[in-house]
Image: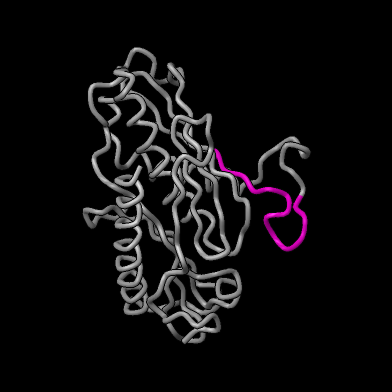
Amino acid sequence: MRATGRAADALRDASFTAGYARHAEGSCLVRMGATEVLCAASVEGKVPPFLRNSGQGWITAEYGMLPRATHTRGEREAARGRQSGRTQEIQRLIGRSLRAVVDRSRLGEITITLDCDVLNADGGTRTAAITGAYVALALALRHLERKKVIARSPLTGQVAAVSCGIVDGRPLLDLDYAEDSAAAADANFVLTAAGNIVEIQGTAERTPFSESEFIALLALARAGCTELFARQRATLEAR
């Protein structure tokens, strides 16, 4: 058992609250343990210049953390006048992950922006953002169907993400902040419900890890995402 009482292959307590942001076309408050991320989907009837007259839509994301999402106050990036490299990298990851399960030719020249704001951070904020943003996106697409803006949803599958790592020589699923800080290696896995890989971000923090250890982490991630897919579906079916 881990310090928190979880088994090595157990997710943190996870919940999805759909429709949390009342004005957004789709929204979801995702909780993974003490990590909370509000994901809101906004629809705009135009696309970036590089997609004009292409007949294709665009899915993009913005990511941010509230100043007291962490143990000490962080400066607002808006006050600094620029985003950090970490923020830019994470929001691009979220956008890529969602576009992987959307047929943009069926969306038409529409942009959907997923704003993912971290309210409380305890590890795994980017993976929680991807998992919650999928729910918000699915709800926004339902809204467009009801309004007859699109004939049918352009979703081609489900996507979710989870972190794994090697802590004290053991592969663990869904690291919290304390575990992530102590990990000899950690990785973020973005997977589809069809069993395909969208992206893997893996790093050895100390000594290199072996292929067998990587396979063990991937197996944990697949099992964890399978549970997250079920919770996504249950949330959308209940809505």
> Residue 17 location, x and y as percent?
46, 49
Our reading of the magenta stretch's main secondary structure is: loop
Query: Would you place residue 202 above or below residue 53 in this image?
Result: below
Could you tell me residue 212's position as x and y percent? 32, 79
Q: Which one is in front, 166 or 221?
A: 221
Instruction: Please give left or right for residue 133 compared with residue 84 in the image.
Output: left
Name above or below for residue 111 compared with residue 213: above
Q: Residue at x 50, y 61 (%)?
A: 32
Residue 75 as seen in the image, left or right of residue 108 = right
Q: Report the side of 233 relative to 96 (left or right).
A: left
In the image, residue 92 sits, relative to residue 30, either above or below, namely above
Q: Nearer the viewer, residue 160 or 228?
A: 228
Give how far across and how far down residue 124 sits, in percent: 52, 61
Q: Which quadrant: the C terminus?
A: top left
Residue drawn at the location 62% of the way across and 51% of the way down: 119
The type of colouring in the image is: one colour
Q: In which quarter of the view is residue 215 placed?
A: bottom left
**Number of on-image labels:** 0
Span highlighted in magenta in the image: 62-74
* Residue 85 picture location, percent across and down: 62, 47
Instruction: Give the camera-side residue of 129 and 219.
Output: 129
Q: Is residue 147 magenta?
A: no
**Farthest front residue in view:** 238
Q: Residue at x 45, y 25 (%)?
A: 43
Q: Residue at x 26, y 32 (%)?
A: 154
Q: Is residue 68 magenta?
A: yes
